[in-house]
Image (cartoon, rainbow, N blue to C red):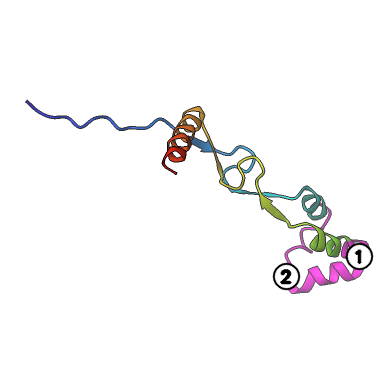
Amino acid sequence: MSLQAPDLTLPVLEIPCTNCNGEKLVSSSRWQRFWSEVPATANTNVNGEWEAYLEQNPAAREEYDRLCREEPEEFPCPECEGRGSIPTEDGRRLLAFVRKHSQQDA
């Protein structure tokens, strides 16, 4: 008679967040719009192009300064709360089970 270990394989409990692609952060749409209007050569800051661009474009300087004060370029993904993944249905059931039984112990 041979003893076999029980199969403890779990189902897939989480999947990568589709909003941030598992990166945990998302970019601000205001910053994306700002950077899309900046010439590629200026935002590399090679040989001081970035400062020269801002000096030659007062409106861009003003918007850049405003964005720096008001909004981070990236922030935790609101979809996954910065975790990079979201639970599957099986994952949600496991979380509910753990919450239920950890509350009883408290």
Write down the residue under mark 2: 46
Residue 93 pos. (x, y %): 48, 29
Residue 24 pos. (x, y %): 60, 48
Viewer-proximal residue among 97 and 48: 97
> In terms of secondary structure, what is the magenta stretch mainly?
helix
- Give the number of the mark in front: 2 or 1: 1
- Describe the element under mark 1 as helix, strand or loop: loop
On-image quarter of the C terminus: top left
Q: Which mark is residue 57?
A: 1
Q: Residue at x 91, y 65 (%)?
A: 57
Q: Is residue 81 left or right of residue 99?
A: right
- Describe the element under mark 2 as helix, strand or loop: helix
Magenta residues (range): 36-62
Q: Amino acid at mark 2?
A: Val
Inspect the magenta stretch and tell me whether residue 67 lies in it: no
Residue 3, located in which quarter of the rendered image? top left
